[in-house]
Image (tube, rainbow, N blue to C red):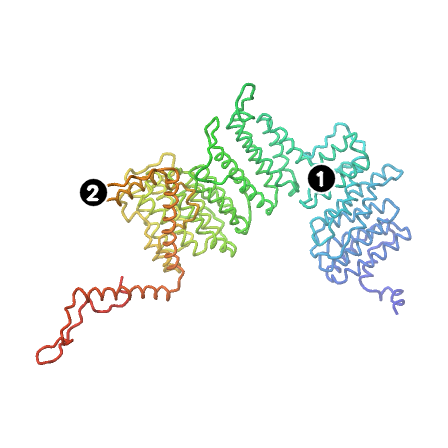
Amino acid sequence: MYGVCGCCGALRPRYKRLVDNIFPEDPEDGLVKTNMEKLTFYALSAPEKLDRIGAYLSERLIRDVGRHRYGYVCIAMEALDQLLMACHCQSINLFVESFLKMVAKLLESEKPNLQILGTNSFVKFANIEEDTPSYHRSYDFFVSRFSEMCHSSHDDLEIKTKIRMSGIKGLQGVVRKTVNDELQANIWDPQHMDKIVPSLLFNLQHVEEAESRSPSPLQAPEKEKESPAELAERCLRELLGRAAFGNIKNAIKPVLIHLDNHSLWEPKVFAIRCFKIIMYSIQLLGHLDANSRSAATVRAGIVEVLSEAAVIAATGSVGPTVLEMFNTLLRQLRLSIDYALTGSYDGAVSLGTKIIKEHEERMFQEAVIKTVGSFASTLPTYQRSEVILFIMSKVPRPSLHQAVDTGRTGENRNRLTQIMLLKSLLQVSTGFQCNNMMSALPSNFLDRLLSTALMEDAEIRLFVLEILISFIDRHGNRHKFSTISTLSDISVLKLKVDKCSRQDTVFMKKHSQQLYRHIYLSCKEETNVQKHYEALYGLLALISIELANEEVVVDLIRLVLAVQDVAQVNEENLPVYNRCALYALGAAYLNLISQLTTVPAFCQHIHEVIETRKKEAPYMLPEDVFVERPRLSQNLDGVVIELLFRQSKISEVLGGSGYNSDRLCLPYIPQLTDEDRLSKRRSIGETISLQVEVESRNSPEKEERVPAEEITYETLKKAIVDSVAVEEQERERRRQVVEKFQKAPFEEIAAHCGARASLLQSKLNQIFEITIRPPPSPSGTITAAYGQPQNHSIPVYEMKFPDLCVY
């Protein structure tokens, strides 16, 4: 029956008839395009037939190869290429198997034209991104066959060149197809690298190239080269550019073996050329180390070349040298700081010592920082995170007793190192995009970064704020808050606002209080200037846009109101400018958050206070404070309530819109941690005066004074530690009380208050019983006339009031 169907064309399956129709009677006429369009439409309409179409085409091609009908072979491969480019369905894997089988058949042929035809089809296939993965496909044959073609020794020089170039293109296609697909065979295995790398080196070695040609890797090819050596060089660069940390060794080891086997170390021209191609970045770094005592201008030139090389390098091309590269650059940065401080390369100025120009070292340091940013910009997100943690680990930890190494300029070495490394960190964090803030700001990194924010140095604090802004800004809103103002309509800013994700909510639950605390302490610094307040405003605004839910909004409002209290009460004895700046900062932020929450009553209250300030106290608004010549008031005491944002009013209007009014009513109290000891809040003079005051209060004036204890270093140290410990205990107790009333159930709080009220009532009863009530009569009762017991009215002090009335 099947034989009869084969003889009768009308009874043959449709896909076979469609395949047969694409072949013309004369192969020189080429593919029948109209019939090819019909076959493509049929394959797209019935994808389950695609594997059968591929199998039938393969059958015809093998038959035509055996019969030396090469015109039909070319037509079959052209049809396969078109079907492969058009179809990306789930059945493509079975079709690809037929396609690779036909390519392998062509590569096995002794005809150079068929080998080149098969290679070109494979290269087209390698550039296709498949929609479905393949778990069982193998490219071992293609690696072996293409490597063999790279070593072609055909008698005809032109044909030999074409075969070798086809082999190199085929290896390039295999690498592109497998290197990024984890489901494919690992192309980095030694069994594959031992074939691919020597084949490329063989073509690099056997070539007659012009003397003027430079093998510099910084010159990217503008068009495809016709020479096998140039194509092999490009393929080798691409191969090493895709190598990760664990794979680079397998790619470099065959190079060393090839140089050994062919005795290419002497003369060393080819070996040098190979390693200029492979390790140019490491070579430059090594050269930078070798020239660490050269003039700053020379070192700056080497670093700038590195920076330019990083711009054109492929992503991840640094391979295993990522941390080594950054470690080298940071080491050079530290050396430059030492040179600038000491004034010489040997640490001391003597006769014959080369004097260092400080401005040249500054130029070199800026070049290093720029290069760090250039390299980091080429890295993927996960490697960039590793680099960020690596740089942060190099930043000296702040302490109360930093060793001050003064050089020619009298500056602190640790301070300069902190500034330069934070500048580098700012360069790396600029443009950093990470959807998950837990990954972008892990706990160990955030703790170290925020501990640096507690230092006295204003420049360091500013860098920390800018780094935080770079991490939090994920939608490019940062530049829209570069100036502080009270816009009546923030829609002109065209802010990009997304809903807070679950990961961001988890991050804020874990780290929000830590961030609020550092913002609060930063606002209280006397050395703040306009840039600090602009950075604080930008940080508050970006948290509100990127990471805010209802709970975060409430806490931010409480935080800003606490900052307003700092300016009003002025326990820190802040200068007038700082107090006006805090008032203006609070006005600008509350104006922004009121329009973001879109609660009419809240917006109205903020607008009323701002209008009142415009009329009566413009020095409390950013438009008068954050200008080149601030217009300030010399008397900020006794500010009337109409000029202040009232917590009770805000709690009332937001509570009616669903916000937590109970939490809004609570004043913000920053959480205190061990880092406070790094914040130089208590000086030695304050400790001594406190000790003297306590002693004067506790000793009677008429009694003979006990000789005062001698004040030594240990005494001062003990006084500082004890006072800090007592303060911390008291603050911890307050924090626990506030936390209990915030988080404990209502029943528990009511029971606790009721117990205290009952205890107070019983004590009052005992006191009144003793002091006021008359002694009892002998009979035990008080009788009135006519022998009737007298009914007394209950005294007020014996009345039992409800517990809620007892304070």
Name the kind of residue labelled 1 in the image.
Answer: Arg
- Give the numbered dot on residue 259: none
Tell me if 389 is positioned left or right of 717 in this view: right
Q: Is residue 600 visible?
A: yes
Location of residue 223 in the rendering, given as x and y in whole percent from the top left corner = 72, 37
Tell me if 759 is positioned left or right of 128 in this view: left
SS state under label 2: loop
Q: Which residue is mark 1?
A: 237
Query: In this view of the protein, which residue sits in the foreground, 553 or 409?
Result: 409
Query: In this view of the protein, which residue sits in the foreground, 326 or 557?
Result: 326
| Quadrant of residue 574 within the rendered picture | top left
Name the kind of residue labelled 2 in the image.
Answer: Lys
Q: Residue at x 34, y 64 (%)?
A: 752
Q: Which residue is mark 2?
A: 702
Location of residue 646 in the rendering, given as x and y in whole percent from the top left corner = 32, 52
Location of residue 553 in the rendering, given as x and y in whole percent from the top left corner = 42, 53
Query: In this view of the protein, which residue sits in the foreground, 3 or 533?
Result: 533
Label 1, residues with CA under 10 Å away: few <14, some 14-19, many ≥20? some
Q: Is residue 227 visible?
A: no
Q: Quadrant of the C terminus?
A: bottom left
SS state under label 1: helix
Vertical arrangement, residue 183 with respect to residue 579, above or below: below
Tell me if 554 is positioned left or right of 79 in this view: left
Q: Residue at x 55, y 41 (%)?
A: 391
Callout in the foreground (2, 1):
2
What residue occupies the far left of the structure in this picture? 785
Location of residue 780 in the rendering, given as x and y in whole percent from the top left corner = 16, 75
| Quadrant of residue 389 within the rendered picture | top right
- In this rendering, the count of numbered labels is 2
Question: Does label 2 or label 1 sit earlier along the sequence?
Answer: 1
Label 2 and label 1: CA atoms lie apart by 92 Å
